[in-house]
């Protein structure tokens, strides 16, 4: 699994009021470029951002969705330093797209715009550290097929990453890891 320091993407570099689609497209392009450098985890930092408009958020969430859907393996992406206005704008866009986003809230990594069931799955995944579908299924008392579906949604939110397990003896198996506050701390 990823051992390198996560990339730290500072949105305040685009201003304290993130309001236009053009500026959002610039930020989205730079996020895609940063992600293209390697498969490192990414911390999207909203520190010093006072306002986030829905059109800027649409561009940014579009880039996040593309990156997480394209790679689908190995990368965590967590938003940090969200104020109430930024959270509201992100929540609006995420609901429209029927997506979620991992973000740090206090000393926990949470999910923005998603179900209590997925949050419970994330919590158990965080407790396990590195895990397989079978191990998480056992801990949750849920069928592996249901856990796989939840893990796909958590991957799309940037909250869980997976890698192919080279030690699998039959077929293809994956090992997973969940976003934790330690990831955010590693980004500095």
Image (cartoon, helix red, strand yellow):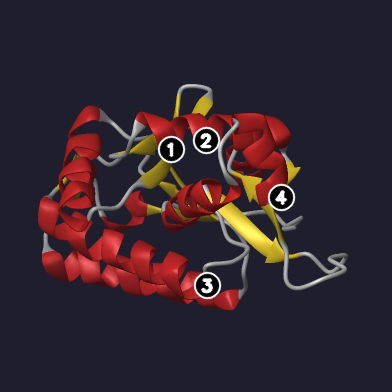
Name above or below for residue 144 compared with residue 26: above
Q: Earlier in the sequence, mark 1 or mark 4?
A: 1
Query: How far is the residue under mark 2 from the one under mark 1?
Result: 5 Å
Query: How far is the residue under mark 2 from the one under mark 4?
Result: 13 Å
Q: Are marks 3 and 2 in contact (CB under 8 Å)?
A: no
Residue on which disc 2 sits? 121
Q: In what element is the residue under mark 2?
A: helix
Quarter of the C terminus within the rendering: top right
Query: How far is the residue under mark 1 from the one under mark 4?
Result: 16 Å
Give how far across and how far down residue 1 sits, in percent: 75, 58
- Left or right of 69 on screen, residue 99: left
Q: Which mark is residue 71?
A: 3
Q: In what element is the residue under mark 4?
A: loop
Query: Which mark is in front, 3 or 1?
Result: 1
Residue on which disc 4 sits? 132
Residue on which disc 1 sits? 118
Q: Nearest the camera: 63 or 129?
A: 129
Q: Residue at the spot x=58%, y=76% of the render? A: 37
Q: Residue at the spot x=69%, y=64% of the render? A: 163
Query: Which mark is in front, 4 or 3?
Result: 4
Q: Nearest the camera: 43 or 94?
A: 94
> In the figure, residue 46 lies in which quadrant?
top left
Residue 19, can we see it?
A: no
Q: Earlier in the sequence, mark 2 or mark 4?
A: 2
Q: Earlier in the sequence, mark 3 or mark 1?
A: 3
Q: Which mark is residue 1?
A: none
Q: Residue at the spot x=18%, y=34% of the render? A: 85
Q: Nearest the camera: 155 or 135?
A: 135
Q: Are marks 2 and 1 in contact (CB under 8 Å)?
A: yes
């Amino acid at each position: 699994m990823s051992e390198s320091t996560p990339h730290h993407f500072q949105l305040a570099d685009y201003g304290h009021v993130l309001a236009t689609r053009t500026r959002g497209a610039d930020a989205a392009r730079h996020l895609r470029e940063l992600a293209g450098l390697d498969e490192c985890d990414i911390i999207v930092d909203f520190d010093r951002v006072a306002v986030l408009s829905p059109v800027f958020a649409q561009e940014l969430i579009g880039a996040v969705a593309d990156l997480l859907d394209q790679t689908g393996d190995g990368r965590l992406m967590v938003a940090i330093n969200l104020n109430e206005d930024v959270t509201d704008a992100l929540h609006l866009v995420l609901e429209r797209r029927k997506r979620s986003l991992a973000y740090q809230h206090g000393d926990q990594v949470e999910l923005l715009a998603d179900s209590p069931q997925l949050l419970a799955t994330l919590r158990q995944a965080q407790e396990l550290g590195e895990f397989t579908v079978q191990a998480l299924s056992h801990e949750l008392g849920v069928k592996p097929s249901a856990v796989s579906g939840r893990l796909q949604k958590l991957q799309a939110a940037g909250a869980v990453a997976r890698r192919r397990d080279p030690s699998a003896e039959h077929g293809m198996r994956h090992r997973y890891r969940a976003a934790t506050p330690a990831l955010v701390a590693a980004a500095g």
